Image (cartoon, grey):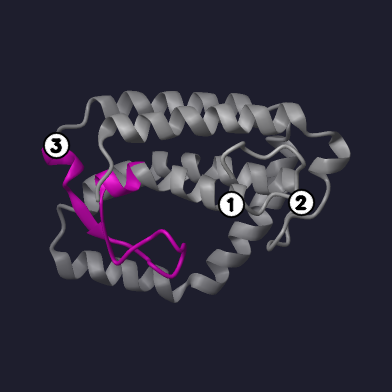
C-alpha cells in the first residue's frame, strides 16, 4: 500500500524527533559502542540513517530523468548498478564511517532537519501524476529498493530505512514503541 504524502511527511517528522531523542539521550560512550548486527558504532549508524534522507535528495531528480528514458535503458542502468553492488557496499560502509566524523552527534540533527525540510518542500509540490513516475532500481543495493520504484516509493524509502536501522542501535534510550 502506497503511503500518502501526509503519511510520508509524518514519518519524516517522527524520524527527526526520534533522532533528536536518541542523540540527546545517549552518552558519548554509548555512541561509540558497536551496534547490533552491523560493523558500525551507534554514531556511525545514526549518520547512515540520516544519509538515507540525503540520498533521496539525489534520487528524486534521477527518477525524473530516468523515467523519461525507454524502459530498456532504465533496466540496463539498474542492472549496471546492481553489477557494482560489492564496490557500492564498501563505499557505503566506509563512507558512513568517514562522514560520521563530520556529521557527528553535534551536526547530524541539523543536517537531517535541513534535508527533511528540503524533501518536504519538494514533496509538497509533487502531483499525483509525478508521484506515480517510476524507474527500475538496483534492488541488490538496499533491502528496501525494489526492481521498479515510483517517486512516491522513493520519498517513503528513507523513513523505512531509518526505522530498520534504528532497531540495530545498542543505545539505552530507544523509541517507546519498539
Q: Is residue 94 left or right of residue 140?
A: right
- Quadrant where the C terminus lies? top right
Residue tagged 1: 165
Label drawn at residue 41: 2
In x, y percent, where is residue 54? 49, 40
Task: Look at the numbered disc 1 and give the secondary structure of its residue.
Answer: helix
Residue ID at (27%, 72%): 76
Task: First in sequence, mark 3 or 2: give its number.
Answer: 2
Q: Nearer the viewer, mark 3 or mark 1?
A: 1
Residue ID at (21%, 31%): 126
Task: Look at the numbered disc 2 and give the secondary structure of its residue.
Answer: loop
Task: First in sequence, mark 2 or 1: give its number.
Answer: 2
Task: First in sequence, mark 3 or 1: give its number.
Answer: 3
Determine which quarter of the picture holds residue 94.
bottom right
Q: CA distance from mark 3 to mark 1?
A: 29 Å
Residue ID at (45%, 48%): 160
Determine which quarter of the picture holds residue 99.
top right
Q: Is residue 173 left or right of residue 137?
A: right
Q: Is residue 148 left or right of residue 161?
A: left
Whether residue 108 is situated above or below residue 81 in the rendered picture? above
Q: Nearer the viewer, mark 2 or mark 1?
A: 1
- Binning the other alpha carbons within 10 Å of mark 2 as few (below 14), some (14 to 19) or many (20 upward) gives many
What residue range appears in magenta?
128-155
Whether residue 178 is situated above or below residue 145 in the rendered picture? above
Question: Label 2 near label 3: C-beta < 8 Å?
Answer: no
Residue tagged 3: 128
Whether residue 22 is situated above or below residue 171 in the rendered picture? above
Magenta span contains residue 137: yes
Amino acid at each position: 500500500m502506497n503511503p500518502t504524502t501526509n503519511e510520508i511527511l509524518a514519518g519524516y517528522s517522527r524520524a527527526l524527533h526520534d533522532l533528536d531523542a536518541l542523540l540527546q539521550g545517549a552518552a558519548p560512550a554509548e555512541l561509540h559502542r558497536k551496534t547490533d548486527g552491523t560493523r558500525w558504532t551507534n554514531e556511525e549508524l545514526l549518520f547512515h540513517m540520516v544519509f538515507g534522507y540525503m540520498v533521496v535528495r539525489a534520487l528524486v531528480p534521477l527518477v525524473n530523468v530516468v523515467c523519461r528514458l525507454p524502459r530498456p535503458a532504465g533496466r540496463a542502468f539498474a542492472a549496471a548498478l546492481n553489477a557494482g553492488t560489492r564496490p557500492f557496499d564498501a563505499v557505503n560502509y566506509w563512507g558512513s564511517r568517514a562522514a560520521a566524523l563530520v556529521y557527528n552527534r553535534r551536526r547530524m540533527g541539523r543536517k537531517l532537519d535541513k534535508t527533511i525540510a528540503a524533501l518536504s518542500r519538494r514533496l509538497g509540490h509533487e502531483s499525483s501524476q509525478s508521484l506515480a513516475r517510476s524507474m527500475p532500481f538496483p534492488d541488490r543495493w538496499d533491502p528496501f529498493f525494489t526492481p521498479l520504484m515510483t517517486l512516491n516509493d522513493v520519498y517513503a524509502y528513507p523513513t523505512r530505512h531509518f526505522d530498520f536501522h534504528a532497531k540495530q542501535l545498542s543505545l539505552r534510550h530507544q523509541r517507546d514503541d519498539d
